[in-house]
Image: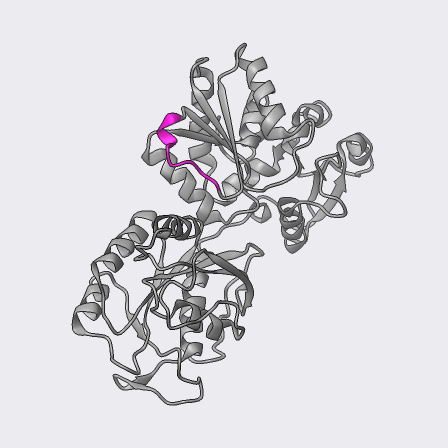
Amino acid sequence: MTQGASHKGHEVKGERMNICFIGKRNVGKSSIINKLIGQNVSIVAEQPGTTTDAVAKRYELHPIGAVTIYDTAGYDDDSNLGEKRVQATMKALFRSDLAVIVLDNQGIKETDVFYIEKLDELKIPFVAVWNKSDVRGADGETMDFFEKRGSAVMEFSAIMNDSQSLPLHGKEERISDLKDEIVKKVLSLKGNEGFIIKDLIEQNDKVVLVMPIDNSAPKGRIILPQVQVLREVLDANAIALCCTEKELNEALQSLNRPPKIVITDSQAIDFVSKIVPENINLTTFSVLFARYRGELRPLLDGLKVLKELKGEDYVLVAESCSHHAMDEDIGLVKIPRWIKEYLGFSPQFTKVNGHDFPDDLEKYRLVIHCGGCMMTRMELLRRINECQRRGVAITNYGMLISEVHGYLERVVRGMGQKA
């Protein structure tokens, strides 16, 4: 693929992708990132261990769109703070869609092999880069290692200008080649995505979006899932009608024919379901996104554990965004209250926010996760897979809310599923 190559035929979604650069200390991760994005955002020095924590840089990678690039500490750091730095590297890696593993002219080492196997375990695709190839080209052992994994090694030199010729095994690899390789990998991931709503509606269908505006709603904007659903309705040449739950009845009466589907915020399902006739499909943004991201069945299965909970069981409430807790915060207050009303008692609750996710997952009988609109599909799927691997049930806010209010069967029916 050459510089300026076309990537036609791909429908690029609005979701930000995470790309993580990993490798030993002083292999040139920061230099490559600086060259890739054309800015000096990471400190570069001869001394090993310059990068001490994961540095995040947001970047527009054409034609992908928005990505976040993470520069991480060397995973061979054996200093006093080395363990904490490596933990920070692992946290960045865990939420990444793609890894770029950087080697240098010292060749592949045991530590590199360990982290490559970790990438395989986490199912994180990667691009391998042999940096400092102006000093020495990739050796046969390294080439063979990656070829056995169905991956090539890009030979590269971060100190060379892109306009300079650098003959490497009969070809020239520059920053534009690395960028194209990353784009190709990311597009292959995006190519696996389906639709949120587009495949459930047809041209001129009417879709009602119920979007409550309360104290927890962000000021001056609407949340990402609502924006994305609205965009897909428009892409399908269908007709969207947006309202709050208070205006829903009037909105329905204003239509000359029933809507194909009504989509509501999960917290309003009890109110909305009493207004929307049974013959009209009704679901929630949360259920739609679980279906879109391939999480619907695993999260529905995880919900079955809810009725089996005991008072001594631990339940983890995980929220991917960090925000000021309101008096009626959904994760801290509403979900524990609804579960207590549903079960007649309260299990033991723990709450985490942002990218924090506990290592001692086995402690929990059930994980209740938010919709994950502030994390990528791969990061959320990785959390689901990790829970399943450790025998811990996981569901999401929307499904739990629909279940405790008695509407789960209805909201998944339109998705061709049974609770």
Question: Is 225 rendered above or below residue 183?
Answer: above
Q: Nearer the viewer, residue 171 or 27?
A: 27
Let me know if residue 362 is in the magenta part: yes
Q: Image quadrant for the N terminus?
A: bottom left
Q: Residue at x 36, y 57 (%)?
A: 125
Question: Is 112 rendered above or below residue 249?
Answer: below
Q: Nearer the viewer, residue 295 or 361?
A: 361
Query: Where in the figure is residue 237, as x and y percent of width and height?
Result: 67, 54
Let me know if residue 70 is in the magenta part: no
Boundaries of the magenta span: 356-363
Q: Residue at x 50, y 79 (%)?
A: 4
Q: Farthest residue in the top direction?
A: 344
Image quarter of residue 166? bottom left
Q: Nearer the viewer, residue 133 or 59?
A: 133
Residue 248 seen in render: yes
Residue 191 seen in render: no
Query: Where in the figure is residue 33, as x and y percent of width and height?
Result: 45, 69
Number of marks in the rendered image = 0
Query: Where in the figure is residue 351, as x and y percent of width and height?
Result: 52, 30
Query: Where in the figure is residue 112, as x and y percent of width and height?
Result: 26, 59
Q: How is the image coloured?
A: one colour
Main SS, magenta residues: loop
Image quarter of residue 358? top left
